[in-house]
Amino acid sequence: MIKGFRDFILRGNVIELAVAVVIGAAFGKIVSAFTDGIITPLIASLGSKEVGGLNFRIRPSNPATEVQVNELLTSAINFLLVAAVVYFLIIAPMNALMERRRRGEEPEPAAPAEDILLLQEIRDLLRDRPIEQGPQR
């Protein structure tokens, strides 16, 4: 499954990308709350107290030169969590279903009911008959 996850991340399929965007939007707030509430404090505890966590300043006396490593790591973890949810809850089950259908293990959708078949037959007979012309005036 990890190889499949890696292939999913590296693939450029438009449909899967659209699914990822929709699911990412749905799970975005949950994942952001998790990373902001748990991951960010853990990362911040690793670095120095002056600039907070793994962040550092290019010029120590100038706060505008601070490089936000914490934010980058948090965003990367956020992305990987959303991608993993999309892959394991949508893409992997869909691929398994398609593979079963391809092998013939998963039944195809049921045939139409008998009354539907009868109506289709009547429609076809009506369509194929010649058009009768009424009396000419």
Image (spheres, rainbow, N blue to C red):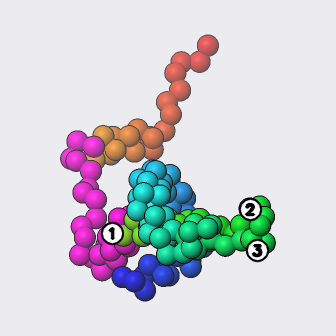
Give the residue number, with chain letter if any, for mark 2: 63
**Quadrant occupied by the C terminus:** top right
The percent coordinates of residue 128 (x first, y second) are: 45, 44
Q: Which residues are magenta?
A: 89-116
SS label for mark 3 = loop
Residue beneath the point at 27% across and 43% down = 116
Give the residue number, with chain letter if any, for mark 3: 58
- For label 2, the crowd category at 10 Å Cα-Cα, with few meaning under 14, some 14 to 19 and many 20 or more, is few
> In the image, what residue type sits under mark 2?
Pro
70 vs 132, nearest the viewer: 70
117 vs 22, nearest the viewer: 22
> In the image, what residue type sits under mark 3?
Ile
SS label for mark 1 = helix
Instruction: Give how far apart the Cα atoms at labels 1 and 3 are.
Output: 47 Å
Instruction: Give how far apart the Cα atoms at labels 2 and 1 are.
Output: 48 Å
73 sits to left or right of 39: right
The percent coordinates of residue 78 (x first, y second) are: 49, 64
Q: Quadrant of residue 127?
A: top left
The percent coordinates of residue 29 (x first, y second) are: 46, 50
- For label 1, the crowd category at 10 Å Cα-Cα, with few meaning under 14, some 14 to 19 and many 20 or more, is few
Q: Quick check: can you spot residue 67?
A: yes
127 sits to left or right of 11: left
Residue beneath the point at 21% across and 47% down = 114
Residue beneath the point at 76% across and 74% down = 58
**Quadrant occupied by the N terminus:** bottom left
98 sits to left or right of 130: left
Give the residue number, with chain letter if any, for mark 1: 93
